[in-house]
Amino acid sequence: MGREGVLNWVVALALLAVPLAAHALDEPFIVTLATKVAILALAGVGLNIALGLGGMVSLGHAAFFGIGGYAMAVLAAPVQAYEPLMTWPVELPGTKSMPVIWLAATLAGGLAALAIGALSLRTSGVYFIMITLAFGQMLYYFAISWPAYGGEDGISIYVRNGFPGLNTLDPIQFCALAYGVLMAALLFSRMLARSCFGLALSGARQNPARSAALGIRPYSVKLTAFVISGAITGLAGALFADLNRFVSPAMLSWQTSGEIMVFVILGGVARLFGPVAGAALFILLEHLLGGVSDYWKLFLGLALLGIVLFARGGLIGTLAGREVAHD
Amino acid sequence: MTEPVLDVRNLQLSFGALKATDGVSLTLRPGEIHALIGPNGAGKSTLIGLIAGTLTPDAGQVFLSGRDVTGTDVVARARAGLARSFQVSAVAGELTVLQNVVLAVQGARGQSFRFFRPALGQADLCEAAEAHIARVGLSDRRAVQAGDLAHGERRRLELAMALALCPRAFVLDEPMAGMGPDGAREMTALLDDLRHEAPILLVEHDMDAVFALADRVSVLVSGRVIASGTVAEIRADAEVQRAYLGEEMLE
Amino acid sequence: MSVMLLIEQALNGLQYGVMLFLMAAGLTLVFGVMGLINLAHGSLFMVGAFACAAVAGATGSFWLGLAASLAAAAAAGALVELTVIRRLYARDHLDQVLATFALILVFSEGTRWLFGSFPLYLDIPDALAGPVTLPGGIDYPLYRLVLIGIGLAIAGALFWLIGRTRLGIRIRAGEADREMIAALGVDISKLYTIVFALGAALAGLAGALVGALQSVQVGMGEPVLILAFVVIVIGGIGSIKGALVGAILVGLTDTLGRFLLPILFSTFMETSAATSVGAALASMLIYILMAGVLVVRPGGLYGRA
């Protein structure tokens, strides 16, 4: 196992040990913070598939994150209002079951990514950045102006949704659930990177013209990766909504897109555990600096500038050195 | 006479007022090496783009094994067995030699949408790739990242990737470019071997290689084929000497 | 629906469009010449608005405020170019995105620190307050009319600058071939600073002019920035003409969509539903326009591709 492998285990175990210790010391706030890290990292794992493996600089991943969140609200809100989800063409009740909600959020995120990706991938480079940002903003304004789910104010889901066999209202159990989903997504991401598809995606990122001459359509490969990426980020959105028991257009805002990207880059682009390290560092900074100054984002901005200009490769990249070829 | 593998008929392409390809017809028959030579700016790269499918002609047709592929794109022509190498070595630099060739093998087989098993854990893919790597003599370099290869090695990797497509025809864009005399000699021998795999349309500046390898030579000047024939005929052709070979023959 | 109201809305759309042009022009120049994507362009818009509001508030003169907005935004632009941006030209887009995102945080939080979280208000100067009566008897706010005039005048000046002056020749040469222009002996880093400061000044001016129509607050720049991106995608990157056409198209589509769609829907829906559906759809209209352009011309209306 290389240095990066050791580092990955350290990060994974730390994210497990911190909430367990906090639980033992009766510090539920820290458990909730760890849950937040796991969920935001999951959003980053999704983005990392597009950004790290596929080289697609998406500044619109808040769209998928928010759609996942709203998918949760759309399914759970009717239940707390004692109304059916829809009455036509068939009567369908809402649901408070996390597995069903997750499935819906994953599908919704993937479908949105299919639509946005199909258009955005007609271009590349700087156009792609601007277009994904613009489509994210479109959904943000749509959520604000569409009154059904609270418009600008968002909507609260008063009781956290349930998972069979667990009490999700207990912070440590919900944290374990988020952690489990994150680990599953990381395993999936690792498998994807090593598969034939991952190789094709890597080829499409590094040299689309060469890939096409090998009979591999870069557009299809990238679009597929973008859909998978959006689906995972959508799932993270549903979990984030459940963590806060609240959904609002803020989840869809460009700041959210920027922050998800910051997690990935802080941790290290294309590094498996990059988003986890990045999200942890971000939340840590938010709470350390946020306690010192109301303007903590000023320092975050300066720190980010320093990282881009002088310490490329992110946290994992700096600690693990140049990536060695797999196998 | 056997049917040509690649049959290019009266291709035309203009960029504004410039006729980059002006009614080019040529054929590639089984087992042969057909060299395409011409001075810089003669339109060789444009012609390759038209044959490979990156450019769309204003008029004319391209047939591959008797099938009209004019309306299809690069990907479809690659799947149909047209293996192209690039003038500037265009391999994925962060991938190893083995990964690059596995990528080519899975591309040819249409296996790029497999999400679960590791690419390098699949024996059939790797064995096929290893065989192509061995063919071009890069076996002991297979775990090296393509970006770290020497120039000549990268050109050979290009050929291994082209081989992986199980091609009906090779279109090779200056495989000798930037090679020293030893490298060029090795490459010449390799190409002579590859013609048994599939016929080669060889765009090349290195006249020693062209005269050593080519069964037929076509001379492209200002987007037109001004002469076509055996090496001896081309050497003797007055128009060719005037337009192009003249200076080099005198050197 | 009266024709008068429609004309008024169309003028609003035009006014919105020319202000977007001031933003988009700077962005597209910076991208065309330096190959840089600058997310912090919206911050320069905000800097201009705050400078104008602060100076106008202190001196009582809107015109001094306007001069201050140009000076502050150009200075902030030049400072940022010299300290941060020029290190990014050789980097990939991802680094540019992250660094300029970081700059947004610095600008936004810095401004909040200086001015607090409450919005400032900037009054329209007395000379320009109130409506004028246009031919046809339409009463229209004079200030908005002046904005249209200023925007179009600046567009004309930019076309002249790019097309007719030495600086313009250098800018165009820089777009075509960076090495050639360096070989011609042009001091390229000075040229880059000038272009960046020019774009910043235009953004700052737009911020100040628009600031009198809405409140001046932290975060006002980014929505405009994203709209300017939509303009550039529609117009084609690097093209000033594309930026102008795209900006006016976006301004008109957005304004007229918000006005007309609810009316359109109310012809076959009940009024309250028509208002909400119409408003929701209108909020997405320019993005749908952008999607349409992408399908037909992925390189934009005046793009090179």
Image: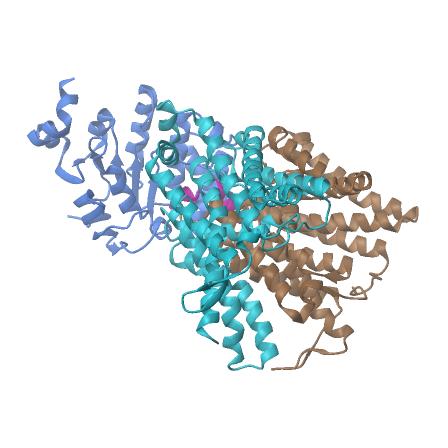
Q: Which residues are magenta?
A: A199-213
* Rendered image coloring scheme: by chain
Q: Quadrant of residue C280?
A: bottom right
The residue lying furthest to the left in this view is B238
Q: Position of residue C237 (x, y in %)?
A: 42, 46
- The reply, left or right, for residue A86 in relation to residue C87 is right
Is there any visible trace of residue A131 in the rendered image? no
Whole-percent x and y of residue A255? 64, 49
Q: Residue at x 24, y 41 (%)?
A: B31
Q: Which chain is blue?
A: B
Residue farthest along the top direction in this orientation: B251
Give the percent coordinates (x, y) of residue B249.
Answer: 14, 21
Quadrant hosting residue C56: top right
Left/right of residue A40 with respect to residue B87 in the rendered view: right
Q: Main secondary structure of the magenta part?
A: helix
Number of callouts: 0
Instruction: Depth check: give the residue in front, A240 or C155.
Output: C155
Q: Furthest-front residue in view?
A: C127
| B190, B53: nearer the viewer | B53
Please state which of residues A182 and C112 is positioned toward the viewer in this rendering. C112
Question: According to the rendering, which colour does chain C have?
Answer: cyan
Residue A200 highlighted magenta (yes or no): yes
Q: Is residue B182 magenta?
A: no
Task: Say whether residue C52 is left or right of residue C248.
Answer: right
Residue drawn 17% across and 44% down? Answer: B22
Residue C43 location (% of width, % of height): 60, 43
B11 horizontally vs C193: left or right = left
The tint of chain A in the picture is brown
